Amino acid sequence: MKENVDILQAMCCLSGMRNQYIKKEAGRYNIKGMTGNSKEIYHITINPNKYETKVKEDSFSLVDYDGIVWCVNNRNTTLVIRRKDKISIQGNCKGEAADLSIDGKANDILEALENNNIPFDQAILYRRQNFLHVSLKLDGVQRSNVIIKM
Protein backbone atom coordinates (compact mmCIF):
# COMPACT_ATOMS: atom_id res chain seq x y z
CA MET A 1 0.00 0.00 0.00
CA LYS A 2 2.75 2.51 0.95
CA GLU A 3 4.59 1.63 -2.27
CA ASN A 4 1.52 2.73 -4.25
CA VAL A 5 1.50 6.05 -2.40
CA ASP A 6 5.19 6.57 -3.25
CA ILE A 7 4.54 5.87 -6.93
CA LEU A 8 1.52 8.19 -7.03
CA GLN A 9 3.47 10.98 -5.31
CA ALA A 10 6.30 10.60 -7.82
CA MET A 11 3.84 10.75 -10.72
CA CYS A 12 2.22 13.90 -9.31
CA CYS A 13 5.60 15.54 -8.78
CA LEU A 14 6.72 14.78 -12.33
CA SER A 15 3.39 16.15 -13.63
CA GLY A 16 3.72 19.41 -11.68
CA MET A 17 0.97 18.67 -9.17
CA ARG A 18 1.33 19.52 -5.51
CA ASN A 19 0.39 16.63 -3.24
CA GLN A 20 0.72 15.17 0.21
CA TYR A 21 -0.62 12.21 2.12
CA ILE A 22 -1.79 11.39 5.62
CA LYS A 23 -1.47 7.89 7.04
CA LYS A 24 -4.32 6.75 9.25
CA GLU A 25 -3.46 3.81 11.48
CA ALA A 26 -5.70 0.77 11.80
CA GLY A 27 -8.03 0.92 14.77
CA ARG A 28 -11.54 0.81 16.17
CA TYR A 29 -14.20 3.13 14.80
CA ASN A 30 -17.67 4.22 15.85
CA ILE A 31 -19.78 5.92 13.19
CA LYS A 32 -23.39 6.72 14.13
CA GLY A 33 -23.50 3.83 16.55
CA MET A 34 -21.88 1.31 14.19
CA THR A 35 -18.53 0.00 15.41
CA GLY A 36 -15.81 -2.07 13.85
CA ASN A 37 -12.13 -2.34 13.03
CA SER A 38 -10.55 -0.28 10.27
CA LYS A 39 -7.48 -1.09 8.23
CA GLU A 40 -4.51 1.19 7.76
CA ILE A 41 -5.29 3.76 5.04
CA TYR A 42 -3.47 6.53 3.20
CA HIS A 43 -5.41 9.69 2.35
CA ILE A 44 -3.76 11.47 -0.61
CA THR A 45 -4.53 15.10 -1.46
CA ILE A 46 -3.64 16.18 -5.01
CA ASN A 47 -3.88 19.79 -6.14
CA PRO A 48 -3.30 20.05 -9.90
CA ASN A 49 -3.42 23.86 -9.94
CA LYS A 50 -0.85 24.76 -7.30
CA TYR A 51 2.80 23.93 -7.69
CA GLU A 52 4.10 25.60 -4.56
CA THR A 53 3.56 25.54 -0.82
CA LYS A 54 3.81 28.76 1.14
CA VAL A 55 5.47 28.67 4.55
CA LYS A 56 4.20 31.10 7.18
CA GLU A 57 6.84 32.97 9.17
CA ASP A 58 5.44 31.74 12.49
CA SER A 59 5.82 28.09 11.43
CA PHE A 60 9.62 28.05 11.59
CA SER A 61 12.40 29.52 13.67
CA LEU A 62 16.06 30.33 13.11
CA VAL A 63 18.51 28.15 14.99
CA ASP A 64 22.23 28.70 15.51
CA TYR A 65 23.93 25.72 13.88
CA ASP A 66 27.57 24.77 14.21
CA GLY A 67 27.61 21.37 12.49
CA ILE A 68 28.34 19.96 9.07
CA VAL A 69 26.28 21.19 6.11
CA TRP A 70 26.26 18.97 3.04
CA CYS A 71 26.12 20.35 -0.48
CA VAL A 72 24.60 17.97 -3.04
CA ASN A 73 25.65 18.29 -6.68
CA ASN A 74 24.52 16.34 -9.71
CA ARG A 75 24.51 16.63 -13.49
CA ASN A 76 21.06 18.20 -13.95
CA THR A 77 21.45 20.62 -10.98
CA THR A 78 18.25 19.59 -9.19
CA LEU A 79 17.46 17.47 -6.19
CA VAL A 80 14.06 15.90 -5.47
CA ILE A 81 13.43 15.45 -1.76
CA ARG A 82 10.55 14.33 0.43
CA ARG A 83 10.20 15.54 4.01
CA LYS A 84 7.15 15.22 6.22
CA ASP A 85 5.36 13.54 3.31
CA LYS A 86 5.78 16.58 1.02
CA ILE A 87 7.87 16.51 -2.15
CA SER A 88 10.12 19.42 -3.09
CA ILE A 89 12.41 20.04 -6.04
CA GLN A 90 15.48 22.03 -5.02
CA GLY A 91 18.32 23.57 -7.00
CA ASN A 92 21.89 22.47 -6.44
CA CYS A 93 24.17 24.43 -4.21
CA LYS A 94 27.46 24.75 -6.05
CA GLY A 95 28.90 27.29 -3.68
CA GLU A 96 28.06 30.04 -6.18
CA ALA A 97 25.20 31.74 -4.31
CA ALA A 98 23.90 32.53 -0.85
CA ASP A 99 20.83 34.09 0.75
CA LEU A 100 21.81 36.62 3.41
CA SER A 101 19.67 38.11 6.18
CA ILE A 102 20.81 39.62 9.46
CA ASP A 103 17.98 40.85 11.69
CA GLY A 104 16.27 42.88 8.97
CA LYS A 105 19.44 44.42 7.58
CA ALA A 106 19.39 43.04 4.02
CA ASN A 107 19.64 46.57 2.58
CA ASP A 108 22.70 47.29 4.76
CA ILE A 109 24.35 44.09 3.50
CA LEU A 110 23.80 45.21 -0.10
CA GLU A 111 25.34 48.63 0.64
CA ALA A 112 28.37 46.99 2.29
CA LEU A 113 28.77 44.70 -0.71
CA GLU A 114 28.78 47.64 -3.14
CA ASN A 115 30.78 50.12 -1.02
CA ASN A 116 33.61 47.68 -0.23
CA ASN A 117 34.14 46.46 -3.81
CA ILE A 118 33.36 42.87 -2.87
CA PRO A 119 33.11 40.88 -6.13
CA PHE A 120 29.69 39.46 -7.01
CA ASP A 121 27.87 38.56 -10.18
CA GLN A 122 24.32 39.38 -9.13
CA ALA A 123 22.68 40.66 -5.96
CA ILE A 124 18.90 40.49 -5.62
CA LEU A 125 17.41 42.42 -2.71
CA TYR A 126 14.02 41.05 -1.66
CA ARG A 127 12.60 43.96 0.32
CA ARG A 128 9.33 42.37 1.42
CA GLN A 129 11.00 39.17 2.66
CA ASN A 130 14.04 41.17 3.83
CA PHE A 131 16.90 39.06 2.52
CA LEU A 132 19.65 39.43 -0.07
CA HIS A 133 20.45 36.73 -2.62
CA VAL A 134 24.05 37.04 -3.85
CA SER A 135 25.64 34.98 -6.61
CA LEU A 136 29.26 34.71 -7.70
CA LYS A 137 30.61 33.28 -10.94
CA LEU A 138 33.40 30.81 -10.35
CA ASP A 139 34.61 31.44 -13.90
CA GLY A 140 34.26 34.58 -15.99
CA VAL A 141 33.60 38.26 -15.38
CA GLN A 142 31.48 39.37 -12.42
CA ARG A 143 28.66 41.65 -13.66
CA SER A 144 27.97 43.37 -10.31
CA ASN A 145 24.30 43.41 -11.34
CA VAL A 146 21.86 44.63 -8.66
CA ILE A 147 18.13 43.85 -8.78
CA ILE A 148 15.66 45.16 -6.20
CA LYS A 149 12.35 43.32 -5.77
CA MET A 150 9.58 44.93 -3.77
Image (cartoon, helix red, strand yellow):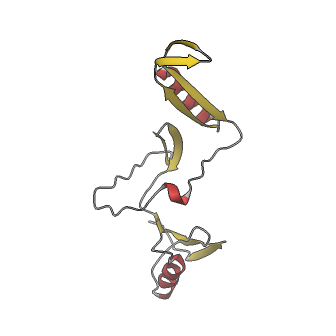
Residue reaching furthest to the front: 33
Q: Residue at x 64, y 37 (%)?
A: 17
Q: Which is nearer the eye, 120 or 84?
A: 84
Which residue occupies the foreground of this view, 143 or 104?
A: 104
Task: Give above or below for 38 relative to 128.
Answer: above
Residue at horizontal 61%, vertical 73%?
127
Q: Residue 141: image x %, image y %?
A: 51, 73
150 versus 73 height, above or below: below
Q: Is residue 115 above or below residue 62?
A: below
Residue 111 coordinates in the image, percent (x, y): 52, 84
Which quadrant of the figure has residue 10? Answer: top right
Farthest residue in the bottom direction? 115
Identity of the residue drawn at 52% across and 18% down: 29
Q: Is residue 65 left or right of residue 143?
A: left
Q: Position of residue 21 (x, y in %)?
A: 54, 32
Residue 108 percent coordinates (x, y): 51, 82
Identify the residue at the far left of this view. 67
